[in-house]
Amino acid sequence: MSKFRKLMAIAALLFASSSVFVACCDDDTTTMGPVPVNSVRATGTSVTVIWSIVPNEKCDGYEVTLMQGSRDGAVIGTQTLDNRTCKATFTGLTPGTEYVVKTQAVPGKGFSASEPYYREFTTAPIVTPVVSSLDFYKLNEYDDKGQPVVNDYYKATLTWPAEDVNNCGGYSVTLYGCTKAELDKATADDPAPVAGTANLTKNTANTVTFDKLKPSTNFTIQIRTTPNAMCDYTNGDWNYVEFSTPAAPAAAN
C-alpha cells in the first residue's frame, strides 16, 4: 500500500471514530452523539452502569436516567455526573424486574443537544423455596464403635417456581443444620454444619431433595440463581428460608 493510501485510510478511520460522538442536525445545530453503555452489572436490588468516556473537551458531563419496564416507564432516578466519570450506581431496585437505563452527554460550549443511548436489563431474581414434602424413615447403620444401630432420619424435598431462561441459568442451594442466626455467627474456625449442597445447571431444575436429616433439628436453606449468557448479573442474591424437622413419630420407636 502506498504512503498516500495509508494516510487516507488513517484519516477515514479517524473520521468514522469521531462521528460516533458528534453529529449535525438538518438545521446545522451541533448535536453530540450517543454515549454507549459498555456494561451493566446488576444484582437483585442494584445496578452499576459503565459507559464510554466521550473523547471531546466540549462534553460537560453525563446524565444517566433509570426507568422501569420500558423507555416510557416510570423514572426511578436520574444522576448528573462530571465528564471524567464513567459509571453510576442505582440501588433499591426490585428483584427479577426489567429496567431501561438511558445515558446522554451534557452538551458543552459549541453543542446544543445530545442523542440518548438506551440499554435494557433485568435484575437478578430472588428464589423462595418451600418444603414440599418431609418423609420419615429408618436406616440401619453402624455407630462409632462399629456396632449396628437403627437411626431415625427425614428426607426433605424443596421446590420453588422456575425462573425464566432469559434471566436464570440454574440454582445454587446449600442446606445448613442450624438457624439463620447461628449461620450468621459462624466463622472459619467454627463453621456452620452443612447438611447438603446442590448446583442445578438448568433453570427448570426447580426441585432438590436432601436426606439423612436428623429429627428435631433446625435447618436453613441458602439459595440463589446462577446466570447464563443472557443474564446481566454475575450471581443472584442469596435468600434464606428456615424450617425444622419434627421429632421421630412415636410409633416408630
Image: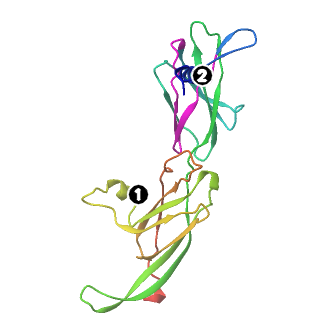
Side (left or right) of 225 relative to 98 = left
Report the number of numbered marks. 2
Compared to 160, does 72 lie above or below? above
What is the x, y in percent for residue 223? 49, 58
Query: Closer to the observer: label 1 or label 2?
Result: 2
Q: How far apart are marks 1 and 2 (CA)?
A: 62 Å
Task: Check the picture and name the quadrant holding the N terminus.
Answer: top right
Q: Residues in magenta?
A: 32-59
Question: What residue sits right under mark 2 in the picture?
Answer: 12
Query: Please, what secondary structure does the residue beneath circle 2 have?
Result: helix
Instruction: State which quadrant residue 218 falls in.
Output: bottom left
SS type, badge 1: helix
Residue type at mark 1? Lys
User: Which residue is at a point 56% across and 19% down the rendered structure image?
Assistant: 11
**Where residue 235 sits in the image (x, y, percent)?**
49, 50
Q: Does the magenta stretch include residue 248?
A: no
Q: Nearer the viewer, residue 171 or 38?
A: 38
The quadrant holding residue 202 is bottom right
Residue sitting nearer the eye, 72 or 11: 11
Q: In the picture shown, does residue 214 fall above or below 66?
A: below
Image side of residue 155 versus residue 116, left or right: left
Q: Which residue lies furthest to the bottom in this view?
A: 148
Point 53% across, 13% down: residue: 60
Q: Quadrant of the C terminus?
A: bottom left
For residue 67, side relative to residue 210 (left or right): right
| Res. 180 mark | 1
Residue under the image location 55 percent in, 52 percent down = 126
Q: The disc labelled 2 sits on which kind of residue? A: Ala
